[in-house]
Structure formats: C-alpha cells, structure tokens
Amino acid sequence: MISMLAAQSLSVMRSGQQVLKDVSFSIEQGEIHALLGGNGAGKSTTLLTFLGFLKPASGSVHVQGRDVNGNLGAARQAIAYLPEAATLYGHLSAYENLHYFLSLAGTDTGREALDDALDRVALQPEARNMRMETYSKGMRQKVAIALAILRDTPILLLDEPTSGLDPVAIDEFNRLARNLAEAGRTILLVTHDVYGACHVADRIDLLQNGVLVGAFDRPPGMDRIDTEAVHVAFAQHAGA
Ligand SMILES: Nc1ncnc2c1ncn2[C@@H]1O[C@H](COP(=O)(O)OP(=O)(O)OP(=O)(O)O)[C@@H](O)[C@H]1O
Ligand SMILES: [Mg+2]
C-alpha cells in the first residue's frame, strides 16, 4: 500500500539553522497522526515542507507516493491546509468567507454544503450571516476548520486546529476528525496539547528540537493513547 504522507530522513534548514533533523514517518489512508512538540520544535515547518513551501536540505517528503519536489501541483491538490494563523476576512460573514475561499480553490459549493460543514464544527446558525469581526476567537477557528473540510481533499494538514477552542468544542473537533478518518480521509495535525492529541490520534510522534524522540500508538480496542505516558515523555525531552 502506498502511504498517503511520508517523510524520509527529512532535514530542513531555516535561516542557516537545521530545524528538522533526519525525521521519518509515514501515514496511511484513514489515519489520524499527531505531531506533538513544544514551541519551536519544528511542527509547522514539517507541514510547510509537505506543501512544498520549504525544501528539504536532505531526505524527502512524499504525498500519495510522489515526491513533492517535482510533483508540487499534485501534492497541493491532494491537501487541504489549515494554517497556524488562518486569515479570514473580518468584514465578510462566515458564508461569504467560505464561498470566496472555496471559489479561489476552484470548488463550487452550495449553501447546503456550507451549512452542513458549519453544523459539523458547531457554529451557531444565527452567527453565520454576521461579519466575522464580531466573532470570538473560537468561532473564527471553527470557520477555518469548516473551510479545510469543505475542500474535500483526501489529505488534511491541520496546524493547531484546536487552538482557541473550549473543551466542549475540542471534543466536538475530535469527533469530527474521527468521522472524517472513518470516511477515508487522512489527517496530519500538529499540536502541543498532550491531552487533545491522545484523544484524537491513532499515532503520536513526539518532536523536540527538530528530532523525533518517541512514538505512541493507540492500542487496538482502546479509544485513546495513554495521556500520562505521553506527558512524562514530553516533559522528559523538554527538560533534556
Ligand atoms: N520564517 C522563519 N524563518 C526562519 N526560521 C524560522 C521561521 N519560522 C520558524 N523558524 C524557526 O524554525 C524552528 C521551528 O519552527 P516551527 O514554526 O516549525 O515550530 P513549531 O513546532 O511549529 O512551534 P510552535 O508550537 O511555536 O508553533 C524554530 O527554531 C524557529 O525559530
Ligand atoms: Mg507552529
């Protein structure tokens, strides 16, 4: 089987510094994979490399079996990306933002599909026609997540998707991610939230200072990864 996403001995330099060192992992279709690590660990850098915005200094990244370097168009077409600081227009409503950004991506989506996605992220119906500058941070994040899932791509790269969400909204996001994965989508998300990662991911890779220092799989039949074990490993490596 061809992996949906694969990094092979990936090293990346930024401003003369090596920020990813010999990173390897692969993600199969329908999996939720979390890259967990502290600030500056290299999580966002990893996503940017899959999108071809940064080039490997050595090693490679593959999307659906093809090297991103040389197949940039195909890679980007297969991926919906939720950036760390998603920028939507404050003077537009949620509907207008979604319509605008989806049409830029060449996706023609009717009101019903927009409502379905906004239902799935639990954005209250009465807010959907209001200008987004009147939204709270969490409400804005919900619209950004809705935009990513509406792209209808096989792969989702999500940079801190639960940032700004309250605990109820985080649970809703986790359920949504699980449903998407069960429907066959592949999700790579990055976070520094140990608890959230343990509840949503099939596998967690722990990244510290650009190096993968540990991996945790959800045991068969269990609904989550052991939070305590991951927390201990996270703290150990952060202090190392
Ligand atoms: N635009 C940039 N130019 C040069 N170096 C950068 C740039 N952005 C990030 N870096 C460096 O790359 C390293 C990894 O940063 P990255 O943004 O990937 O971390 P992160 O794990 O996403 O952290 P956070 O949890 O804070 O978002 C850091 O040392 C950072 O200083
Ligand atoms: Mg980041």
Image (spheres, rainbow, N blue to C red):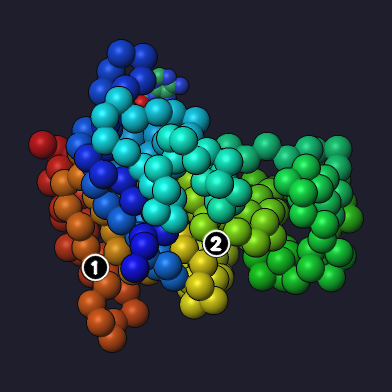
Within 10 Å of disc 2 (Cα), the crowding (few <14, some 14-19, many 20+) is many
240 relative position to 231: left or right: left
Residue 48 shows in this picture: no
Of 99 and 176, which appears nearest the observer? 99
- For the point 65% across and 62% down, the residue is 152
Q: Residue 154 carries which label?
A: 2
Residue highlighted by disc 1: 217
Q: Position of residue 61 (x, y in %)?
A: 36, 42
- Front-lying residue, 223 or 7: 7
Which residue is pictured at 89% across the width and 55% down the height?
A: 129
* Mark 1 vs mark 2, CA separation in Å: 22 Å
Report x, y in % for residue 12.
31, 28
Task: Please provide percent x and percent y for residue 219.
Answer: 23, 77
As helix, strand or loop, the secondary structure at mark 1 comes to strand
Q: What residue type is labelled 2?
A: Pro
Does residue 136 appear to the left or right of 188 in the view shown? right
